[in-house]
């Protein structure tokens, strides 16, 4: 299985382990991730103004590249996935936006949202299959109680992202089961951690992060897993003493598959 891969800026700087373990695990599962050539930062925040074109062009170029390569586009960073998926859906649904983009970029073949964009977790669930992942596990997490933290970017807006049920998601819990652990559900697993308001309202960001961490711990979790670098930063930066550790899901996957220590 061959996929185009969009890592994004943060996976090249602050979240290198999210990227490294994603690549190692994909190879162990027989999935070939080919990094898109000359990709640019997606912008990390999807603009709300419909007439805002320029800030979405980086995402559009990545989508066009994947279309031209004839491959499904895989992302790992939640923020990048949100931007790319929403840009692609807008190109399908908004004729005015689509016309302006094609006039500006002037591709040889006009683009109308033909690329398929999936998150790495969707690749595991829908393309490889969690049963196949389970068969490849050599270091089981049996006996470990692990809580999923979704945050907001993977799930919302629900109809556009079409990732999972935004109110009661299960994909990360199913991943946790596949690596042998026991998933722990708690009230704040799909609530925003407050990372986007850190600069404007740090106390609120701290309050949101600690509420999540305290809730997971109270439910019996020994660890939290996430796919979002923004959430990882906010949860770890604002963790009170004795809080449960937060890990990227790709790190646990690499450990379960026995490739965590392999040099990429």
Image (cartoon, rainbow, N blue to C red):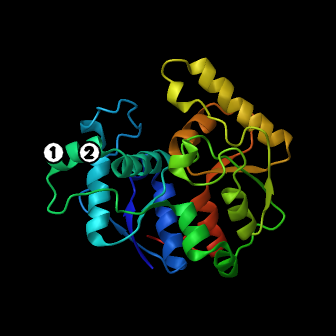
Q: Is residue 256 above or below residue 50?
A: below
Packing grade of label 1 (10 A; few <14, some 14-19, many >=20) is: few
Q: Is residue 124 above or below residue 93?
A: below
Q: Position of residue 187 (x, y in %)?
A: 78, 39
Q: Is residue 228 left or right of residue 189?
A: left
Mark drawn on residue 104: 1
Q: Position of residue 33 (x, y in %)?
A: 41, 71
Q: Quadrant of the N terminus?
A: bottom left
Q: Is residue 8 left or right of residue 138?
A: left
> Residue shown at 58%/45% (left/top)?
158
Task: Mark yes or no: residue 179 visible.
Answer: no
Picture quarter containing residue 170?
bottom right
Q: Position of residue 206 (x, y in %)?
A: 64, 25
Of badges 1 and 2, nearer the viewer stands 1
Whichever of labels 1 and 2 marks the residue nearer the N terminus, that label is 2
Which residue position holds label 2?
A: 57
């Amino acid at each position: 299985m061959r996929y185009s891969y969009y890592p994004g800026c943060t996976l090249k700087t602050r979240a290198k382990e999210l990227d490294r373990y994603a690549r190692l695990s994909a190879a162990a599962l027989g999935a070939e991730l080919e990094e898109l050539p000359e990709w640019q930062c997606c912008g990390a925040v999807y603009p709300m103004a419909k007439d805002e074109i320029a800030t979405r062009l980086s995402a559009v170029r990545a989508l066009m590249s994947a279309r031209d390569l004839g491959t499904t586009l895989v992302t790992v960073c939640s923020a990048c996935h949100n931007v790319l998926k929403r840009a692609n859906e807008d190109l399908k649904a908004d004729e005015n936006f689509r016309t302006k983009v094609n006039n500006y970029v002037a591709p040889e073949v006009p683009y109308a949202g033909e690329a398929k964009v999936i998150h790495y977790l969707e690749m595991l669930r829908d393309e490889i299959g969690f049963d196949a992942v389970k068969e490849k596990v050599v270091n089981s997490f049996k006996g470990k109680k692990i809580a999923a933290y979704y945050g907001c970017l993977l799930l919302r807006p629900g109809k556009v992202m079409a990732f999972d049920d935004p109110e009661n998601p299960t994909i990360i819990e199913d991943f946790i089961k596949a690596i042998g652990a026991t998933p722990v559900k708690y009230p704040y697993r799909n609530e925003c951690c407050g990372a986007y308001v850190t600069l404007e309202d740090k106390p609120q960001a701290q309050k949101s992060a600690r509420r999540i961490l305290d809730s997971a711990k109270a439910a019996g979790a020994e660890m939290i897993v996430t796919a979002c670098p923004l959430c990882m930063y906010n949860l770890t930066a604002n963790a009170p003493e004795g809080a449960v550790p937060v890990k990227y899901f790709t790190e646990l996957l690499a450990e379960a598959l026995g490739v965590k220590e392999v040099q990429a």
